[in-house]
Image (tube, helix red, strand yellow):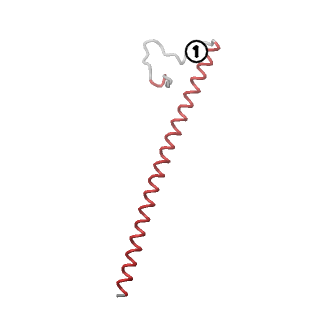
Amino acid sequence: MNELGVNILNIVIAVASVAVFVIVLVVWFFLNRASVKANEQTALLTELLEQQKQQTELLAKLTRGDPPNPASTPVPGEPIMFKDFIAER
């Protein structure tokens, strides 16, 4: 009878260990996922900041009356690339 009690205790400890391991894996998964989303948002916000700086610079040039930089204006007949556009909100 005593041997049966020891075996059941070992099984309970093994099951508890597996349960704790699974819980740790689930918590790690959600923390890792949140971290990746935060990194993507940081990258998007940095890109948005750069675009806003370009818009502010262009607006300042236009309000001062300075002619726009001829190197940045496309030549007629040249295809317009997406990188030449500044995103609007």
Is disc 1 placed on a helix, strand or loop?
loop
Q: How many C-alpha atoms fall within 10 Å of the one at disc 1: few (<14), some, or many (≥20)?
A: few
* Rendered view: 51 above or below 3: above
Position of 51 with respect to 27 (left or right) is: right
Residue shown at the point (40%, 67%) measured from the top left: 18
Q: What's the residue type where badge 1 is placed?
A: Pro
**Residue in the foreground of this view, choosing between 89 and 69:** 89
**Which x, y percent locates residue 26?**
43, 57
* Rendered view: 74 above or below 39: above
**Which x, y percent locates residue 46?**
55, 35
* Rendered view: 83 above or below 27: above
Q: How many marks?
A: 1
Q: Image quarter for residue 21? A: bottom left
Residue shown at the point (43%, 59%) measured from the top left: 25
Residue, far right: 64
**Residue in the foreground of this view, choosing between 89 and 84:** 89
Residue under pointer 1:
68
Residue shown at the point (44%, 54%) measured from the top left: 29
**Which x, y percent locates residue 60?**
62, 19
